[in-house]
Image (spheres, helix red, strand yellow):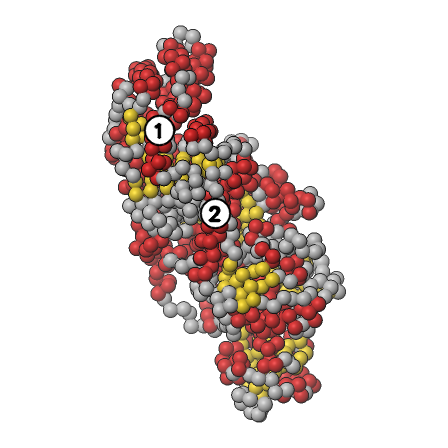
């Protein structure tokens, strides 16, 4: 029989399938918000520790009627049971205001610009933001802050993070270490393990509810699409989001199609990138449209203004926040180019002379072959091996295409002369060795840690072998052995597991690794500053974008040492190539100039693509012999569209910042809803952990499972996970095969011997994170015992279950008025889609003479001096029959109060709802008119006509989805509020 009641709320106790459960989350399960998926945790011995989702249209889910609440006298000393039960109930209340709670949020020092991002997200109702802060400003921290707030509001149970494979471990550990948010990493190894545990037909995203995957893994839409289409997320995060925008023909790009699918199946969405656009209005608009398709009316995504994008966009530069960040940024130093530049050897000059002749031929005859035009020269600048690997192929191809080509003799001579050269004798390699000597680098444990970039995997291989030989180091090129070597390499062809392990090893202080030779797979997103402050650019990429990304790996927020950058250059006297060094010098200086400005690297050449920058610098600078090209680029290469877009983004950011400042300065609405007491706490986190766990140890289950006592010091609590906790959190060696979705701790984060080390001091966690980087890798051995921590959430659930189903504790106080009976409630109003809108803790007191009063729970507890009460046994003598009528009356009064809050909220929010729906109608009408205009000009049955029809159908689907997953989820309340009687206090006077 389907459920007779459709109003549920987290914390409510229900009966289903002959077992008792506690509701943890409620989500709409149909398009009309008439049926729900009710997530529950087992509350009795039969199902304790299990998680389940019940559908109201299939299961009979019977809530405990608060009017039937039985009162259970608390016999514990000092009413400890009632106090801990009430605290647990309070900690299950979702936050429903729009103000972030920074106290105890995580192990970091929040910056004002980061708080601004969180405040903006919370004011959106359904957070959808493009975080476009510059490289190294801490976007991951902003994401963690926003996630923490959504989890506290009951809207962060199901989380999907998509990022590059090189960043999986880093992102996962950052959210765990600083915010205690567990994400299960489904890399290739994780998926393989999961497939051994579940059938192939089982949706992996239902097994784990907080997941991090690489975009490359998940964009295999054909394999995962059936599972993705059945999964609804609370939050989807896409890091390095510019990779999903689709530069052209976006619908053909798998990553864009994936992002679009995710956008439709999530409540909230965050996109993060330091490069939010490529100079093209349409490409940038795609990112905004992923967040909200109704943001931009123009179906071609070409016409929009700052007001359209300001609600969804945040962009700050290092110079914007440098003063606030203080010593979190260290001034970087570029080692003078005079000392990082050397002359070519005589043997190299011979090759350079031929390359100068090749450039002269290119200038004279021209060619569309990039390799001949400048590619061969760039490869020789990298290494003789990189050049040799290409020159023979080019010569053979030219001979096949034109046997009489004037290039053939020269290409043949180049192939012959370069074959005699090797990296070990090259001037650039000898320059590198001199700088290694200056740095005291010899591969020993005392050597500084170095990050060395090269663009060529051929150069990388030759360089690794030469360094290993010269410094007498053992080196293997096998993927799986890199993390254990003094000298390691990474490139884009690495498996995700080996790539993560190598990057983690490089950031670990006690690791043997002393040098990481990386291609540009390590130039984007990866944090490499924890144990490294030296970068050596072995060969120079001809791109401002690439150089800024590379340098950002060590020059970023939290770098405590002075970043030192070395650019290795080789000078030649060979004819047309002589002037190249000056241009390379200017390229490096331009990068440093941008570092001290409020501009993006892309804004200099306005090409917005590293390969395009390389081509421009080669053709307009090197081949044309124009050393001034970088100085004149801003005038000569000004792209009108890019110029307008950059100005638009700056205007949008200023507009958004001004609005945020205005809202922050305005007083909060003076309404009952705004006075919600969802943040009421009786105990600090540390005290609740200590008192709650010690109480559980005395229970029959605690004694049966032999809960070990806590180890408590003034600054730390050590909890050895008992069997039920280990099983609850998905420990590898825990008995049972239950994998618990939102609570599963990453396998890498499981503490040694199951001992969770928790502290109330963020500074200690910061030190523990640094200690992990020194000794063990990414994973901190000590975390905050914040409300988010899965151990604390387990404790809350266990304490709530100490009171029998359908019961509430009753205690006594001599401090209440004579004859007073105080009934304490937690009430909630949810949306039609099950999302909490209002949570309120209040008390209803009955006094002699038929009088009663209502007040916030905090006031009632203070009057009763609740925390200081001692148990005199008075509550054990109460008259159950006499109290039954009071319980019913108190529940009715509580429900009436919650209905009043519901109605008040509706009145307060109506103008916002009407304005948004008017905006939506305007968008729909304008967009549809434009679509129909395009439609009527197309031939029937054409590809373009079919596309136009699909876009109109998609608009209609979006409007339906918007009503269901936006208006009904965040604005329209369910018809009936719910309330729970959580405590009764009777006066002893």
Residue 143 placement, left or right of 62: left
Any mark on residue 430, and which? 1
Any mark on residue 696, and which? none
Using the rendered image of the protein, determine whether residue 625 is visible from the camera's viewpoint. no
Q: Quadrant of the N terminus?
A: bottom right
Front one among 570 and 656: 570
Q: Could you tell me which residue is drawn at 36 percent across and 32 percent down? A: 433
Give the residue at mark 2: 510
Q: Quadrant of the C terminus?
A: bottom right
Q: Secondary structure at mark 1?
A: helix
Q: Secondary structure at mark 2?
A: loop
Q: Is residue 54 above or below residue 342?
A: below
Q: Is residue 901 above or below residue 250?
A: below
Q: Could you tell me which residue is drawn at 45 percent across and 53 percent down? A: 770
Q: CA distance from mark 2 to mark 1?
A: 29 Å
Q: Could you tell me which residue is drawn at 47 percent across and 59 percent down? A: 765
Which of the 4 quarters of the picture holds residue 327?
A: bottom left
Residue 964: x %, y % from top left: 56, 55
Q: Is residue 411 above or below residue 127?
A: above
């Amino acid at each position: 029989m389907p459920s007779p009641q459709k109003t549920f709320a987290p914390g409510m106790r229900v009966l289903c399938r002959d077992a008792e459960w506690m509701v943890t989350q409620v989500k709409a399960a149909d398009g009309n918000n008439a049926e729900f998926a009710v997530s529950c945790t087992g509350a009795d011995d039969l199902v304790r520790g299990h998680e389940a989702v019940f559908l109201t249209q299939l299961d009979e889910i019977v809530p405990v009627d608060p009017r039937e609440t039985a009162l259970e006298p608390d016999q514990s000393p000092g009413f400890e049971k009632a106090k801990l039960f009430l605290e647990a109930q309070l900690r299950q209340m979702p936050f429903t205001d729009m103000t972030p709670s920074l106290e105890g949020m995580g192990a970091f020092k929040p910056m004002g610009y980061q708080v601004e991002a969180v405040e903006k997200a919370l004011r959106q109702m359904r957070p959808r933001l493009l975080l476009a802060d510059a490289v190294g400003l801490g976007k991951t921290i902003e994401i963690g802050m926003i996630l923490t707030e959504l989890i506290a509001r009951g809207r962060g149970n199901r989380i999907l993070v998509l990022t590059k494979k090189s960043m999986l471990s880093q992102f996962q550990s950052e959210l765990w270490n600083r915010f205690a948010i567990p994400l299960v990493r489904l890399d290739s190894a994780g998926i393989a393990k999961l497939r051994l545990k579940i059938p192939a037909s089982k949706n992996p995203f239902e097994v784990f509810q907080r997941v991090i995957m690489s975009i490359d893994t998940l964009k295999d839409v054909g394999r995962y699409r059936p599972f993705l289409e059945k999964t609804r997320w609370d939050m989807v995060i896409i890091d390095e989001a510019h990779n999903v925008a689709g530069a052209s023909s976006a619908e053909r790009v798998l990553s864009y199609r994936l992002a679009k699918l995710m956008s439709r199946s999530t409540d909230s969405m965050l996109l993060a990138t330091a490069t939010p656009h490529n100079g093209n209005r349409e490409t940038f608009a795609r990112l905004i449209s992923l967040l909200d398709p109704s943001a931009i009316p123009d179906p071609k995504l070409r016409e929009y203004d700052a007001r359209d994008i300001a609600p969804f966009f945040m962009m700050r530069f290092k110079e914007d926040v440098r003063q606030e960040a203080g010593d979190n940024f260290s001034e970087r130093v570029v080692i003078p180019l005079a000392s990082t530049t050397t002359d070519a050897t005589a043997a190299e000059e011979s090759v350079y002379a031929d390359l100068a002749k090749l450039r002269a031929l290119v200038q004279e005859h021209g060619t569309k072959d990039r390799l001949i035009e400048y590619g061969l020269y760039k490869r020789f600048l990298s290494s003789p091996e990189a050049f040799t690997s290409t020159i023979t192929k080019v010569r053979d191809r030219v001979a096949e295409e034109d046997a009489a080509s004037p290039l053939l003799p020269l290409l043949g001579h180049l192939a012959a002369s370069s074959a005699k050269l090797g990296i070990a004798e090259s001037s650039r390699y000898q320059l590198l060795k001199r700088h290694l000597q200056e740095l005291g680098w010899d591969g020993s444990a005392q050597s500084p840690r170095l990050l060395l970039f090269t663009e060529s995997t051929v150069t990388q291989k030759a360089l690794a072998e030469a360094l290993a030989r010269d410094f007498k180091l053992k080196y293997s090129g096998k993927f799986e052995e890199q993390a254990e070597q003094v000298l390691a390499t990474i490139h884009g062809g690495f498996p995700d597991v080996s790539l993560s392990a190598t990057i983690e090893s490089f950031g670990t202080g006690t690791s043997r690794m002393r040098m990481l030779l990386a291609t540009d797979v390590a130039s984007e997103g990866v944090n490499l500053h924890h144990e490294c402050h030296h970068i050596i650019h072995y060969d120079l990429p001809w791109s401002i974008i690439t150089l800024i990304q590379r340098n950002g790996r060590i020059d970023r927020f939290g770098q405590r040492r002075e970043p030192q950058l070395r650019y290795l250059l080789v000078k030649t006297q060979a004819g047309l190539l002589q002037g190249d060094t000056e241009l390379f010098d200017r390229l490096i200086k331009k990068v440093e100039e941008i570092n001290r400005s409020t501009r993006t690297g892309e804004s200099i050449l306005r090409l917005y693509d590293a390969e395009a920058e390389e081509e421009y610098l080669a053709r307009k600078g090197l081949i044309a012999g124009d050393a001034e090209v970088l100085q004149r680029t801003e005038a000569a290469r000004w792209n009108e569209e890019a110029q307008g877009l950059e100005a638009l983004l700056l205007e949008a950011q200023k507009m958004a910042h001004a609005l945020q400042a205005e809202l922050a300065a305005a007083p909060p609405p003076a309404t009952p809803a705004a006075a919600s007491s969802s943040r009421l706490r009786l105990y600090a986190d540390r005290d609740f952990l200590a008192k709650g766990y010690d109480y559980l140890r005395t229970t029959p289950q605690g004694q049966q499972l032999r809960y070990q006592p806590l180890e408590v010091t003034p600054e730390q609590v050590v909890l050895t996970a008992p069997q039920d906790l280990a099983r609850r959190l998905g420990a590898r060696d825990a008995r049972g095969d239950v994998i618990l979705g939102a609570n599963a701790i990453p396998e890498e984060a499981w503490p040694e011997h199951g001992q969770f080390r928790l502290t109330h001091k963020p500074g200690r966690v910061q030190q523990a994170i640094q200690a992990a980087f020194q000794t063990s890798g990414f994973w901190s051995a000590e975390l905050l015992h914040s409300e988010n921590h899965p151990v604390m959430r387990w404790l809350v659930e266990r304490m709530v279950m100490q009171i029998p189903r359908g019961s509430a504790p009753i205690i006594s106080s001599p401090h209440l008025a004579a004859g007073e009976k105080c009934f304490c409630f937690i009430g909630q109003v949810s949306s039609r889609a099950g999302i909490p809108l209002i949570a309120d803790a209040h008390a209803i007191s009955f006094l002699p003479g038929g009088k009663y009063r209502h007040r916030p729970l905090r006031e009632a507890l203070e009057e009763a001096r609740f925390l200081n009460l001692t148990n005199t046994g008075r509550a054990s003598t109460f008259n159950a029959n006499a109290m039954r009528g009071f319980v019913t009356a108190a529940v009715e009064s509580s429900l009436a109060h919650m209905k009043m809050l519901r109605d008040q909220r509706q009145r307060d929010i109506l103008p916002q709802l009407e304005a948004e729906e008017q905006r939506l109608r305007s968008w729909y009408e304008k967009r549809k008119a434009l679509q129909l205009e395009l439609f009527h000009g197309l031939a029937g049955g054409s590809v373009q006509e079919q596309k136009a029809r699909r876009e109109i159908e998609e608009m209609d689907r979006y409007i339906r989805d918007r009503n269901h997953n936006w208006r009904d989820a965040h604005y329209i309340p369910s018809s009936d509020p719910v309330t729970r009687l959580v405590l009764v206090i009777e006066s002893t006077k």
